[in-house]
Image: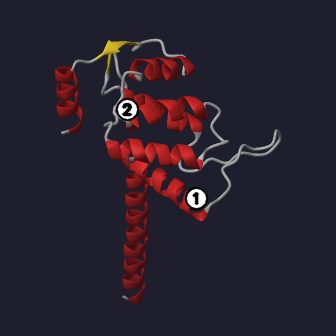
Amino acid sequence: MKTVLRTIIILLVGLAVLAGAGYWAYKSLTSTDEQQISKAAEEADEKLQRGEDTEAPKANDKVETVGLNEVQFQVKLHQMTHQKIEATEKRGAIEMTPARIDEMIKILRANEGAYEAYDFYEQSLTAWEQGDFSNAVKVHNTIWEWHNGTVGRATGMMSKEQEAEFVEKHFN
C-alpha cells in the first residue's frame, strides 16, 4: 500500500513539474511583439540608468546588444510601419504608439555602437517621435530590402481613414 501511495505522489509531483515547465514554455514562446519591445525597453532603460558605456566598439571588440539584436529591432521597426503604409501584403503588425516609439528609442540608445544602421534608426524614430511619419514608406522599404523582401513593397502612405481601419482591425 505504501509503495502504491508513494508512486502516486511521485507521479503527481512529476506531472506538476511538467505542467509548470509547459506553462512557462508556452508563455515564453507566445509573448507578443509588443511585450518583447516593452521587455527590451526595460533592459535598455536599466543599462542607460546604470550609465553603462554605449560608445562605439573598437574594431575587434565583441559587441553585445541589449534587449533586441539588430535584426529583431529591424523587424519590430518594419512591422510598426505597417500601420502607415500601403502594400499588397503585410506580415505582422505592431501598433505605432507614442509609448512604443519611446520604447524603441530607449532600445536604440542602449545599443549605440552595436547597431550598424544606428543613424538610420535614430533619424526614423526621431521623426516619428515628433509626429512626422512621412518617412514610413522609406523606412519600410529600406528594411524590406535589407531582408531581401519579395512581396509587400510599400507603394505609398495610407489615408487617415485607411489607417483608422487598420488600427481597428489589428489592435482593437
Q: CA distance from mark 1 to mark 2?
A: 24 Å
Q: Using residue 139 as the reference point, say whether residue 31 is left or right of it.
A: left
* Residue 90 point in image, percent of width and height: 35, 21
Residue at the extreme front of the image, as rendered: 130
Check the picture and name the quadrant holding the C terminus. top left
Check the picture and name the quadrant holding the N terminus. bottom left
Judge whether 147 appears above or below 50 on screen. above
Foreground: 82 or 128? Answer: 128
Q: Using residue 48 as the reference point, say whether residue 77 is left or right of it.
A: left
Residue 32 visible within the image: no
Q: Which residue is mark 1?
A: 47
* Residue 163 point in image, percent of width and height: 22, 25
Q: Earlier in the sequence, mark 1 or mark 2?
A: 1
User: Image quarter for residue 68?
Assistant: top right
Residue at (45, 36) in percent of width and height:
126
Q: Which residue is mark 2?
A: 80
Query: Which residue type carries mark 1?
Result: Lys
Q: Nearer the viewer, mark 1 or mark 2?
A: 1
User: Image quarter for residue 11?
Assistant: bottom left
Mark 2 falls on what kind of element?
helix
Q: Using residue 66 as the reference point, say whether residue 85 is left or right of it.
A: left
Foreground: 16 or 26? Answer: 26
